[in-house]
Every structure is written in structure tokens, then in C-alpha cells.
Image (cartoon, rainbow, N blue to C red):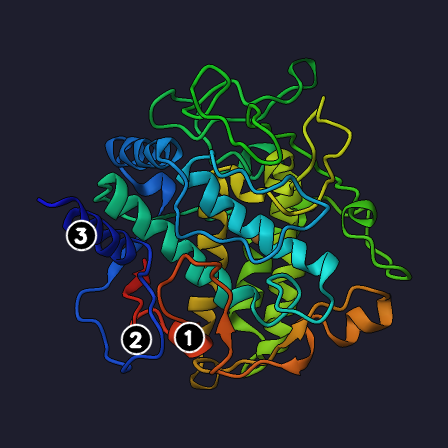
Amino acid sequence: MPLSLSLITLCLVFVSLLSPVGGAVERRKCSHPAVRKEWRSLPHKERADWITAVNCLAKLPHDRMFKPSVNPPDIAPYNASGSLFDGIGSLTQTLNSLAKILFMHTWIHYTGQFLPWHRWYINTFDQALRSRCGYRGSSPYWDWTKGSPSPSSRVRVMQYLPVSGLGGWGAASTQYHVLDGAFSASSSFRPSYPYPHIMWRNYTLFPPLDKLIPIPGFVWNLSMPATDNFTRPVVEGIINGFEGDFRNFHATLESGPHTYVHLCVSGDMAGVCPVGAPPDCITAPTFSANDPLFFLHHAMVDRIWYKWQHKHKSNKNAFFGGSVQRLENATAFLRYQTGGPPFLSMDSVIPTNGLATSPVILSDVMSTTEGPLCYIYD
Ligand SMILES: [Cu+2]
């Protein structure tokens, strides 16, 4: 094959691999949606296959389509020598950073982009595992409400098996490095943001929310165990409540279970700088996708939205959110928990930083079966 032709072919393949969600398209209903399943319900072989595919992505070179839209001063510079996994992870990093440097811009946390963007993002990651690394199994989610009533073991979705386990908690004596499971210190898995390091997790029952998400004047409840925020009654209350009220549904889900799971797992999942990090490392949720658990966690967040959308007719297409993060003080935060004006519409573009070949708009991801997406949850 001539070089130019093979390059074009490669480009087309690449484009199709990383653009599972295209621009505005006809809202056709997909006939054979994939079924996403809880991690622990997958056979060990399927778990091992998923982990193998993640490790495969971690070894592939950076996606050359990936173009950070900013080079913010508060995060590690874009590292083009990182892996494809890092490239997808750093998309979160880049977009999060917008919150700090470009006040009037599109952000993905505490704005209306939160649920739609993460739905697109998880699907993009899932499609990359399949197209680039041959994964054929079910896409997993992590049901935080499942399992032992003991807080530390309830969070412990991560079995310790070296091939099919996601690994457990780190310990203070070993800098909280994950020492078991498939992404442990003894594996070759090394996230490259904010600098190459061993993945770490630090089980934290009382996260310092006031320091991790500082909002002047806003009083966090620091005495409530993090795990109390993602129990079954809490999650069922969110799914069954807020009829037709997307704003309060989103605000409760994002600030509640979503945030507390990140901070309870801590370490990479919370974007906390590792022990021994260079002094220029700044703790922020800019590299939380380093931990593969992130994708199971956000699939669960997406599942809660999916279940809520199917609970009442008035929930299905409900949406309300702004494009500007408002964390400058408690008054602004409480008024605009899902983003301040300008408000988003179904035609608003989801920022993809080059990982989609055509613009993705909010209406593309409002349904997981009508439009470009094609999956359901069990
Ligand atoms: Cu998150």
C-alpha cells in the first residue's frame, strides 16, 4: 500500500475509533444496545480482559488528534510522549483547568456540562478500549451501594487479584501506593500526569472538603463520613426524587455521591498530589482519571442519570445548566450549582479537545439509545 494511502487509511481508522459520538445526527433508535454491568457481576475472565485493554491503551502512544485547548499554568504541561490512556485522562485535566484560568468558558464541573460531558467521555473511553485494544466484554460500572455494610470494604470494589483485580488501598508506610491488583507498583502501569508516578489510593473517611473544594463562605459538613453520602437509600432517593427537576437532581448527584466517592478513594482519584511530588504540583481534580476506577465510578454516575431519566416522562429530556462555574462564594455557588449564565441549550457544544471528529452537542447524549449512543444499564 502506498505510504500516503496507508496514512489516509490509518487516519480514517483512527477517526472512527475515537469519534463514537458525532455531531447532530438523526435521532434513530439503536436496535442492539450494549448492556453495561456491575464490575463484580462480570466473570473474572471478562474483568481481566477489561484490565488488559486498559493496560493496552496505557502503552499506546498519545492520540495525535488530542489537542489541549489551553496550557494552563496550574497543571503539568501537556506531555506528548505520554500514552493514549494518559491522553484521554488528560482531557479531564485540561478541561478542569479552564475553571481556574478562563472564567467565561465551558467547564465540566459545577456546570451544565457535567453529566452530558462525562457521558460522552466514558463512551469515548469505552469505544477506544474496543477499537484500539480489542475489548469485547461488557462495559463495567461500580455500584457503590453494593456489598458489605463496613464502610472501608463497601468502597472496596477493587479485588486484589493480580490479573483481574483493580487493587486495594495504599498504606501510609508505603506512600499510599497501590500494591496489589493489576495496576500496582509492581505492574508497569504508570500514569504520567502530573508526572510519572505509581498510582495511589488513600481511604479517607473524612475528606477535608473545605481545602479540596474551597468556596469562600460555604460551610461543608466535615463530620459526616464520606461513605454516608453514597449509601443505597441516598442513591435511591436521588433516582426517585427531583421529578422533572434536572437542576436539583444534577446538583445533588454531583456534590453528593459523585464528589464523596472521589474524595473517599482519594489519591489519584481525588487529584491529590502524590507524596514526594515536585513543589509545582497543584492538587485539583485535574488528573482523577489516572485511576482506572474513575471510569467505573463515572459509569455509575451516568447510570444514576439513566435510571432517573427513565423514572418519569418529565425526566427524560429535562435539562438545565449554565456554562460558567460559580465557586467564587457561597451565594454564587448556591444560586448556580449547575453553572451560571450564559445557559446551555441542546445545541451547545460539548468540549472534546480533538477527540471527536465533528462537533458533539448536548442533544447527542441526552439518550443512550436514540442518537449516536447505543447502550443501556442492567
Ligand atoms: Cu468525577
On residue 371, the disc is 2
User: Eyeballing the image, is 342 above or below 78?
Assistant: below
Please, what is the three-letter code of the amino acid marked with disc 3? Answer: Thr
Q: Residues within 10 Å of mark 3 (few under 14, many from 20)?
A: few
Please, what is the three-letter code of the amino acid marked with disc 1? Answer: Met
Q: Nearer the viewer, mark 3 or mark 1?
A: 3
Q: Residue 214's x, y, as percent? A: 82, 53
Q: Residue 310's x, y, as percent? A: 40, 75
How far separated are the C-alphas under marks 3 and 2? 26 Å
Left or right, 209 with respect to 253, comes to right
- Quadrant occupied by the N terminus: top left
**Mark 1 highlights which residue?**
366
Whichever of callouts 3 and 1 sits on the residue coming sooner in the sequence is 3
Task: Looking at this view, name the residue that lies furthest to the bottom.
Answer: 314
For the point 38% across and 22% down, which residue is it? 161
User: Which type of secondary structure does the marked residue at label 3 adopt?
Assistant: helix
Q: Is mark 2 within 8 Å of ligand 1?
A: no
On residue 71, the disc is none
Whichever of callouts 2 and 1 sits on the residue coming sooner in the sequence is 1
Q: Is mark 3 within 8 Å of ligand 1?
A: no
User: Which type of secondary structure does the marked residue at label 2 adopt?
Assistant: loop
How far separated are the C-alphas under marks 2 and 1? 9 Å
Q: Residues within 10 Å of mark 1 (few under 14, many from 20)?
A: many
The reply to whether callout 3 and callout 2 are in contact (CB within 8 Å) is no
**Mark 3 highlights which residue?**
9
The reply to whether callout 2 and callout 1 are in contact (CB within 8 Å) is yes
For the point 34% across and 28% down, which residue is it? 164
Residue 257 visible in the current orientation: no
Left or right, 137 with respect to 198, comes to left
